[in-house]
Image: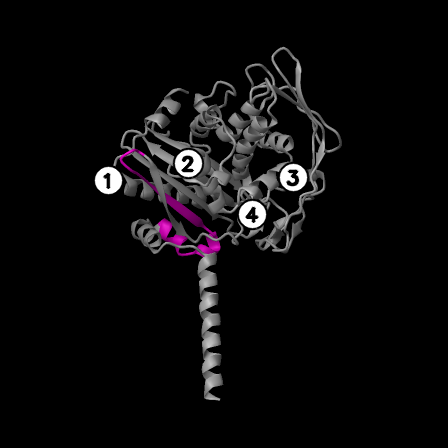
């Protein structure tokens, strides 16, 4: 009897330990980062940090250290990072599609076809739409290059839709899974369509400057099987497509999903390809990388094609961490290579910050949910009151830490500076 009682205790203790380890594995928090942010936070930020369940925030601070040969190594610090804690990724999913679009062009191996080739999108069925011209482009024609510019400069939704159609839903998700991003799912365009309609992608034609047909891509249907077994319910209520209030949580189960840790790794894999496993690298050329770096960091005021109204698209329009303020400008010696997203009360920024004046570099990724009334689709979110100030202050705290952090070897950032100054 005593033996059985002892065995039962061991079993129960094992279950408890296993359960505790599982919980820890789900929620990744580095005690140092938690303590450092709380220690340096204003009363406003303290109030946010003390309510992780309300604001659903997650943060990843990536410290970069260089050796004597300027080779970088990466150390990640986490706060409330959990792949199972859903947040709507909004426009951050445009980032992997920009990478995948360039990779697909390379994989086609068609002589003369590149990111600047004219891309004419046709329509095979409703509600698909065609795009045959682009008045914002210098030559008046749409192209993969121009769509990617608009994605990083101002987070253009139509540009994302056209890349989604070029790559196809099935290829997007198969490739992401192949690279190890098994939790990510890209299921839809940013336009009103059913789940089935999003499986069909438009026929597309590419032409050279002499108007010769280079590539004809027929309409495609995705047969990719998504895992919708885990419900993702957010809020207390929402307004449906008919603007009727539904008094139950909004179901995001079939929506796009991109965990914060995956987005951070995707950005790192393109900025620092040698820092990730070969299977996590995109098939990109040196020219592709430089092109991406240029437009990830460029500001709307620096663009001639497209030309933007800087009252609406001010320089920090898509720069949240320690910049997002319409009244102030981004310092010329600091650049953010990033992608942001905002929708349904969720704000996200995935960025690599470089300060050429002070030889500082680091990565910072985060998201927050600001929806006090718990109702989605009512356009009543506390972006300006809580969301953007959260990013601004967290960014400033980490930046100030980096300014004073002692490094064995100072980073040599000339390559990034040449890309920025070459704009």
Quarter location, residue 217: top right
Q: Say whether residue 49 is left or right of residue 180.
A: left
* Of the image marks 3 and 2, the number of the one nearer the N terminus: 3
Q: Nearer the viewer, mark 3 or mark 2?
A: 2
Range shown magenta: 44-70
Asked if residue 50 is among those painted magenta in the image, a careful observer would answer: yes
* Of the image marks 2 and 1, the number of the one nearer the N terminus: 2
Q: CA distance from mark 1 to mark 4?
A: 37 Å
Q: Nearer the viewer, residue 35 or 331?
A: 35
Q: Say whether residue 185 is left or right of residue 405.
A: right
Which numbered circle lies on residue 13? Answer: none
* Of the image marks 1 and 4, the number of the one nearer the N terminus: 4
Which numbered circle lies on residue 170? Answer: 3
x, y percent for residue 79: 40, 52
State the SS at label 1. loop
- Asked if residue 53 shows in the view, the reply is yes
Which numbered circle lies on residue 274? Answer: 2
| Residue ID for mark 1 | 408
Q: Is residue 153 above or below residue 64?
A: above
Density class for disc 4 (Cα within 10 Å; few <14, some 14-19, many ≥20) is: some
Q: Is residue 39 above or below residue 67?
A: below
| Residue ID for mark 4 | 182
* Of the image marks 3 and 1, the number of the one nearer the N terminus: 3
Badges 2 and 1: C-beta atoms under 8 Å apart? Answer: no
């Amino acid at each position: 009897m005593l033996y059985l009682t002892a065995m039962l205790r061991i079993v129960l203790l094992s279950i408890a330990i296993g359960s505790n380890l599982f919980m820890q594995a789900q929620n990744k928090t580095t005690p140092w980062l938690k303590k450092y942010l709380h220690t340096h936070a204003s009363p406003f930020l303290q109030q946010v940090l003390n309510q992780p369940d309300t604001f659903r925030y997650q943060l990843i601070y990536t410290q970069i250290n260089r050796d004597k040969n300027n080779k970088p190594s990466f150390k990640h610090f986490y706060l409330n990072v959990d792949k199972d804690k859903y947040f709507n990724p909004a426009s951050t999913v445009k980032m992997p599609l920009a990478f995948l679009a360039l990779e697909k062009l390379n994989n086609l191996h068609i002589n003369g076809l590149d990111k600047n080739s004219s891309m004419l999108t046709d329509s095979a069925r409703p509600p698909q739409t065609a795009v045959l011209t682009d008045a914002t482009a210098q030559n008046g024609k749409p192209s993969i290059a121009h769509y990617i510019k608009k994605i990083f400069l101002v987070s253009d939704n139509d540009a994302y839709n056209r890349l989604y159609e070029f790559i196809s839903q099935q290829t997007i998700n198969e490739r992401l899974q192949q690279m190890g991003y098994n939790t990510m799912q890209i299921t839809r365009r940013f336009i009103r369509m059913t789940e089935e309609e999003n499986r069909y992608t438009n026929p597309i034609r590419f032409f050279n400057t002499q108007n010769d047909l280079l590539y004809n891509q027929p309409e495609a249907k995705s047969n990719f099987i998504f895992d919708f077994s885990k419900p993702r319910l957010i809020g207390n209520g929402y307004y449906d497509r008919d603007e009727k209030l539904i008094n139950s949580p909004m179901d995001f189960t079939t929506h796009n999903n991109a965990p914060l840790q995956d987005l951070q790794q995707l950005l790192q894999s393109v900025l620092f390809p040698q820092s990730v496993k070969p299977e996590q690298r995109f098939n990109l050329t040196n020219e592709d990388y430089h092109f991406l770096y240029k437009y990830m960091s460029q500001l709307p005021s620096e663009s001639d094609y497209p030309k933007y109204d800087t009252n609406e698209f001010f320089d920090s329009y898509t720069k949240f961490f320690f910049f997002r303020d319409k009244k102030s400008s981004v310092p010329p010696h600091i650049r953010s290579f990033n992608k942001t997203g905002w929708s349904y009360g969720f704000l996200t920024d995935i960025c690599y910050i470089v300060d050429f004046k002070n030889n500082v570099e680091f990565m910072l990724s985060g998201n927050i949910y600001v929806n006090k009334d718990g109702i989605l689709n009512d356009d009543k979110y506390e972006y300006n009151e809580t969301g953007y100030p959260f990013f601004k202050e967290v960014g400033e705290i980490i930046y100030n830490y980096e300014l004073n952090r002692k490094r064995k070897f100072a980073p040599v950032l000339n390559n990034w500076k040449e890309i920025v100054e070459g704009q």
